Amino acid sequence: MDPDVSVMFTVSGPFLIRHSDTIAHLSPEFNKKNHDEFDVHIESIWEKRRLENPKLFNGTKFRLHSVSHESNGPGCKTTFNLGITCYRDFISTNWAPNAEDILRKGEQDYNNTQAFMSDAMGVGALVQTTDNHVIFLKRSIHCGEAKGLWDIPGGHAEPQELVGDLPVENIDVTKMDPVKVIEEMFDSIKREVIDEVNIPSSCLSEPELCGIARNTTAAGRPSVEFVIRCSLNSEEVKAKYHQGNQSEADESTSICLLPLETVIKMKSEDEFWQNMAPSAKGCIILYRLYDTKVTDLGQTDLDNDV
């Protein structure tokens, strides 16, 4: 396992998880715990980061506390236990200079290293073209994280899409519609692919959940990873990207498409892997685990046919 990544959840069998098999459980119990010693520095850390990168802006995010899965097989339900947080708190806890202290205190007080972390839930996708290539984007220097590294398309599910532009302290998660929250989670990753790569929605399959990985360089920040199939080939994707009229064109500087087989077999010492964002590494590791289960099932079927 790459030291930048740990696996929080992976599909238990050779099946990706569909929107219809996913449930949201929303509660303030799943919010970040308050701690005066750490929280007093949130605003100053945030303002320092904004001075360094004026393109940063605050916004509400979902906080992923935990996830549970019923059992193996298609049709089984996966539950996301979600609270609310914001990007300011994420930068000022998960990326705080004393993040290790915050993790230790969470373990001491709650037997949970993440208790005092924002843990804003990210989303990402392995986007597969018709000629079996995977899309990577080189992140620009204006991004808040993983500057200059190769990444998959991704971002965040946005509570604002459901409740409007409210400050985080004014949002009561118990009044949010769990069905719409799951819709936003799945819609958000498709939106990110459209906005970052310039691929039309009509060319993208419905996202399917592959798992959740934690970014250990960001104190265990979780990212929900999906698989999306694209009806364009790699050259057509490049042409769309280079049109440059996508709404988030400034978030990346170049595009690279690699054969899926190359991505699955990539080693930690490979130069491309070493220049990859933790979120992309996490997505690939989760996809490998899924692919292994699919391969094992195929081999079992072959053995049974003998």
Image (cartoon, grey):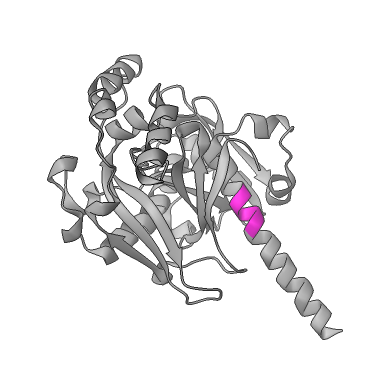
The quarter holding residue 288 reads bottom right
- Magenta-drawn stretch, dominant element (helix, strand or loop): helix
- Identify the residue shown where x is 31% and y is 54%: 82
Residue nearest the viewer, comparing 202 with 50? 50
- In the image, taking residue 78 as reference, residue 11 lies left or right, namely right
Residue nearest the viewer, comparing 196 with 76? 76
- In the image, taking residue 172 as reference, residue 109 lies left or right, namely right
Quarter of the image with the C terminus in it: bottom right
Q: Residue 43: image x %, image y %?
A: 23, 23
- In the image, taking residue 202 as reference, residue 163 lies left or right, namely left
Toward the front, the furthest residue is 108
Is residue 144 visible to us here?
A: no
Q: How many marks?
A: 0
Is residue 83 visible to us here?
A: yes
Is 58 a magenta residue? no
Toward the left, the furthest residue is 170
Q: Residue 199: image x %, image y %?
A: 47, 48
- Identify the residue shown where x is 44% and y is 64%: 68
Is 287 a magenta residue? yes
Magenta-drawn segment: 285-289
Q: Is residue 135 above or below residue 250?
A: below
Q: Residue 80: image x %, image y %?
A: 37, 60
Residue nearest the viewer, comparing 63 with 235? 63
- Identify the residue shown where x is 56% and y is 44%: 6
The quarter holding residue 53 reads top left
Q: Is residue 132 above or below residue 304?
A: above
- Identify the residue shown where x is 16% and y is 39%: 167
Quarter of the image with the N terminus in it: top right
Q: Residue 195: image x %, image y %?
A: 39, 43
The quarter holding residue 103 reads top left
